[in-house]
Amino acid sequence: MSQPGKALDRLQSHLHHTRLLGSISSTLYYDQNTVMPPAGAAWRGEQLALLASQLHERQSSETYADLVAAAEAEVSADAPLPLRRNLQLLRLELERQRCLDPALVQALAMAQSRGNAVWQHARSRNDFPAFAPALEELIDLRRRQAAQLAAAEPVARSPWEILAQPFEPDVSKARLQALFDPLEAAIPPLLERVAAAEEAGPAGAVPAGTDGSSDRTGSLDLPESLQEQLCAELLESWGYDASRCQRSRSAHPFSCTVGPADFRITTRVVPNQPFSAFLATAHEWGHSLYEQGLPRGDDHYFPWPLGEATSMGVHESQSLFWECRVARGRAFAERWHPRFSAALGRDPWGGAASFWRQLNPLRPGPIRVEADELSYCLHIVLRFELELALLEQDMPVAELPDAWNRRLQELLGIKPASDAEGCLQDIHWAEGLFGYFPSYALGHLISAQLAEALEAGIGPIDGHVAAGDEAALQAWLAQQVWPLGRSVNGEELVERVSGRALGAGPFLAYLENKVGRLLEGG
């Protein structure tokens, strides 16, 4: 945004104040999910609703529309492409915001905050009926929102597709189905291969447990303080800067950017799952690294759309890269096995190879965030199908638990022991985030294809990790992926970086290779 004219200056000032309001909302959300006492939920809901109303007014008012129009008139057709792309994205979002009823915006914010609080209570008590009315309200409000937004869509889209646009620009149900069908066809045979090897092979040949909690010596209980220490060591080794970053605890791990130099992540320690917090820290730090690497430049640039994430699929690809390609990799296990053993004062794994297998369990479990790489995407297929049923096929909310359990049995051969580890496990629907879940599976596909491009450019990932040179991986991503921001959509980014269209092939090839190595002992 070099040498802006007067209209661009005025628009910049307006956007800056809008982002300040948005960052206040993000701060309140972070507080709500980390340290806010439960009794504060109602007041917090009113605070967030007020901010949502003010943000909507600033993003849809005639004053703002005039500012955008004046800036568009000031910018010539031969102006720098980033400037023209910024204005194009601002215009698109303006038209969407102008379609929304302010009363609906406020009602949604209230319902999201209320849904969050009710979900936390219901999940802790395994009480789906207590959550059902909040979910019904959110579905109704999101349907109304989609109906209002339809007028601003450049092409005809279904209600679910409209709601998915903020997470995955230009996504369609048909495209997702084309990407997910190969996963649904190829993953179950791999799961059967693992199950057969476990049944036939010697003890310890296959990673045990759904969460890495068991090893050849029995149950491993890693003290909470030790888990926190190892998480801190991991972050420090990957460039954590305490002057810009903060890690806290929450019921559901997440990453949150509060401002251009204020990055937050959260994790949780799960009883009897000794690697959960460690791997979640790697995952959320991957999100934060991406946020820190986006092309914001400085505070002056922060409000412009090109400084935003390309898509949530790309966002997830970055977190999954650090969690799965690095922290679950063999070279990483070789380096960190001595740290874990020294912290415990013993080696319960019997060597780095077994430690690596424990970081990579290959047995399906009911919990998405604890799922192994092999079964994870089928968790997303389940949620994608159920979202469509709830939003577009009139499935009653009361039928959700049974539908969930039945389809999970079909996909993974398991049934949750309770709704708390079934349809109540995720926070997303409690906040009305319909259209979000497919980004997780897209993240796996994108990560695989970007990893191939990275290795073609700078050599094997394991080689850099073995040398303690994760900085080289960060540098490649910082040059090839992070600076693109919203100059492209997710699929365009993949094609630009890898040279070919996004597909399931690279991810399935990665799974085949990893499963083979794990079954063969390395």
Image (spheres, rainbow, N blue to C red):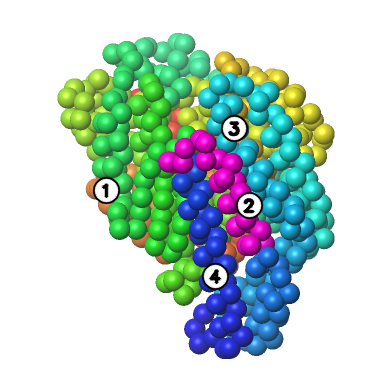
Tell me, for residue 49, which label it has, or none. Answer: 2
Circles 2, 3 touching at the beta carbon (< 8 Å): no
Residue 502 in the image: above or below residue 476: above
Q: Residue type at mark 3?
A: Trp
SS state under label 1: helix
Q: Is residue 414 left or right of residue 62?
A: left
Q: Read off the magenta span.
A: 34-56
Q: Residue sitting at 71 percent across and 48 percent down?
A: 107
SS state under label 3: helix
The residue at which mark 4 appears reads as 17
Circles 4, 3 touching at the beta carbon (< 8 Å): no
Q: Residue type at mark 2?
A: Ala
Query: Which is in the foreground here, disc 2 or disc 1?
Result: 2
Give the Cα separation between the discs numbered 4 and 3.
32 Å
Number of other residues with Cα within 10 Å of mark 3, as a class: few under 14, some 14 to 19, many 20 or more? many
The residue at which mark 3 appears reads as 119
x then y, percent, for residue 104? 74, 52
N-terminal label among 4 and 2: 4
SS state under label 2: helix
Q: Residue sitting at 47 percent across and 11 percent down?
A: 199
N-terminal label among 4 and 1: 4
Give the Cα separation between the discs numbered 2 and 3.
18 Å
N-terminal label among 3 and 1: 3
